[in-house]
Image: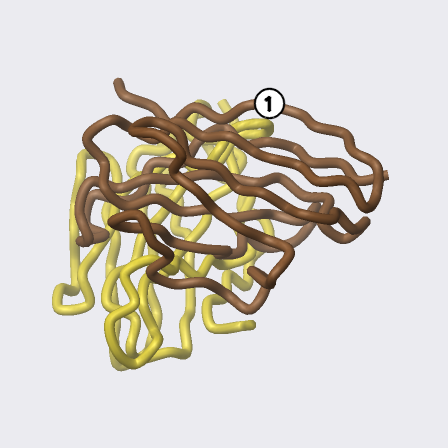
Chain colours: A brown, B yellow
Amino acid sequence: EPEVTQTPSHQVTQMGQEVILRCVPISNHLYFYWYRQILGQKVEFLVSFYNNEISEKSEIFDDQFSVERPDGSNFTLKIRSTKLEDSAMYFCASSEAVTALLGYTFGSGTRLTVV
Amino acid sequence: DQQVKQNSPSLSVQEGRISILNCDYTNSMFDYFLWYKKYPAEGPTFLISISSIKDKNEDGRFTVFLNKSAKHLSLHIVPSQPGDSAVYFCAARGGAGGTSYGKLTFGQGTILTVHP
């Protein structure tokens, strides 16, 4: 079964450093998303991306965050200057169509630890 | 953001019996509701969804019921199996008052334990 692949599975970084989280969505999917889950809290929406541009973003997704689809397969989330509160599981997801009937396919996540 | 709430943090059932997981929402603009299952160290796995214009959707052992007037949905698992033990998340799509295709709003999750 096709899957969304995320790398690395765990990243430790110093506060203030830049990190790039990588995702390879399912190949025929057109819509891409980033979510995060801080330990003990809900899964939260960050951003959605379609047709090479952001289609929606949450208030969490401030100027420190950016997304990019640098080639035909990768989808990245960059955090420019990490803060302690950015420590969380980050999930990439993709979907084939705009309808949510078939759900979004999530990757296994990257655990980001900011020290 | 309490637009989607799962009020039961945990549920324990016997193998073979029915599991009923509940979810309440406040935003009447949500257009789809989804259930996800999650194991530790894995991403959420899609189980089943329902459009806001339906009141029931069934897929094998899983049935989702939607009561729009009560702003309530539930997931029924029959019969429950030990492999169903996981965290179950309710999620709702949309809610911006217009087109909002990207955003899923999740509940807090319910830990389901199915005992053999």
Q: Residue furthest front?
A: A70
B22 vs B40: above or below: below
In front of the other: A36 or B9:
A36
Subunit that carries the residue with mark 1: A
Label 1 secondary element: loop
Residue B42 x, y percent position in the rendering: 52, 28
Residue A70 x, y percent position in the rendering: 40, 34
Instruction: Please identify the quadrant where the N terminus of chain A is shown.
Output: top left
A18 vs A108: above or below: below
Question: For mark 1, does the 10 Å Cα neighbourhood hold few (<14), some (14 to 19), or many (20 or more) residues?
Answer: some
Q: Residue furthest top?
A: A1
Direction from residue B49 to residue A56 in the image, left or right: right
Direction from residue B61 to residue A86 in the image, left or right: right
Direction from residue A26 to residue B24 in the image, left or right: right
* Occupied quadrant, residue B69: bottom left
Instruction: State whether residue B114 appears in this view.
Output: no
Which amino acid lies under the numbered mark 1 shown in the image of this protein?
Pro
At 53% from the left and 56% from the top, the residue drawn is A44
At 28% from the left and 45% from the top, the residue drawn is A31
Residue B91 x, y percent position in the rendering: 39, 56
At 18% from the left and 34% from the top, the residue drawn is B60
At 32% from the left and 39% from the top, the residue drawn is A94
